[in-house]
Structure formats: C-alpha cells, structure tokens
Amino acid sequence: VQLQASGGGLVQTGGSLRLSCAVSGSTFGMEDMAWYRQAPGKERGLVATITSGGDTNYADSVKGRFTISRDNARNTVYLQMDSLKPDDTAVYYCRVEYVIGNPSVTYHYWGQGTLVTVSS
C-alpha cells in the first residue's frame, strides 16, 4: 500500500488549496481516511477524518473552513481548504486505516506529506 499526497503550496491569507491523496495497492479492508498536519516545532495533530460511509469529523480549528471528501472509485481522499490562515501552515499528511482479519487487526498507512504555507 502506498499513499501519494499532492496539492500543497504557497498561498496568501484567505486563499484556498485542495489536497489530494491517492492510495495504490490493495484496498481490501480499507476503512477511515484522514488528514493530519504538523507545524514546525509542534506535534502532528488530526485535521479531519472521513469514514468509509462518508461520515466526517473535524478539528475545531478548521471547522467551517476545511472539507474532507473521498472518491472510493479512485481510492482518493481530498481536503478542500478555504479561508486559509497563517496558523494553517504545516506539512499535511494523509492516513488510511485498514481493518483486516478475524479477530480484526488495524493497520495505518501514511503518505509522505505535502507542505502548505500561508503567507500573511
């Protein structure tokens, strides 16, 4: 399983970016997909998640500004980021969860990260 994230870049305050993360390899047992971010000097934190059924959850800091979505046919998860702020500057990572077996075992795979820089 490999995850390829893309879409990062430099944007001004108030601008928008759309991140993508494509999953290649086996998708058997693939469940939740998520975006995390890590700002310089800070720990990696959850941005948004989406279940296989489409239920979403967001960090309070991005609610109303970011939208996570997924295209199961393309095995891709997206993060639409609007009204960007300098505090959103970070490396953004995608993560995919697999649940396999009986009894089930959970695996997590991470993308390589894509840098988002928001200038003031």
Image (cartoon, helix red, strand yellow):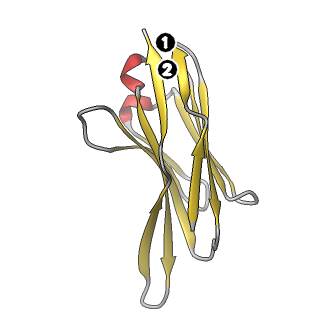
Please tell me which residue is depicted at 54% across the width and 58% down the height of the picture.
Answer: 51
Where's the N terminus, which quadrant? bottom right
Residue drawn at the location 45% of the way across and 40% of the way down: 92
Residue for point 66% across, 53% down: 76
Which residue is labeled 1 in the image? 13
Q: Which mark is on residue 84?
A: 2
Task: State the residue in front, 26 or 106.
Answer: 26
How crowded pointer 1 is (Cα within 10 Å; few <14, some 14-19, many 20+) is rated as some
Name the residue nearer the viewer: 60 or 38. Answer: 38
Of residues 93 and 49, the one nearer the viewer is 93
Toward the right, the furthest residue is 73
Q: Amino acid at mark 1?
A: Thr
Indicate the position of residue 99 as horizontal and vertical percent values.
Answer: 49, 76
Q: Position of residue 103 (x, y in %)?
A: 42, 90
- Badge 2 marks a residue whose secondary structure is loop
Q: Is residue 56 left or right of residue 59?
A: right
- Location of residue 32 in the rendering, given as x and y in whole percent from the top left corner: 52, 61
Please determine whether, in this image, residue 101 is positioned above or below residue 81: below
Secondary structure category for the residue under label 1:
loop
Q: Quadrant of the C terminus?
A: top left
Mark 2–mark 1 CB contact (< 8 Å) = yes
Q: Position of residue 7 (x, y in %)?
A: 61, 35
Local packing at callout 2 (Cα closer than 10 Å; few below 14, some 14-19, many 20+) is many
The single residue placed furthest to the top in the displayed view is 120
Q: Gap in Å between the C-alphas at discs 2 and 1? A: 5 Å
Q: Is residue 69 left or right of residue 104?
A: right
Q: Earlier in the sequence, mark 2 or mark 1?
A: 1
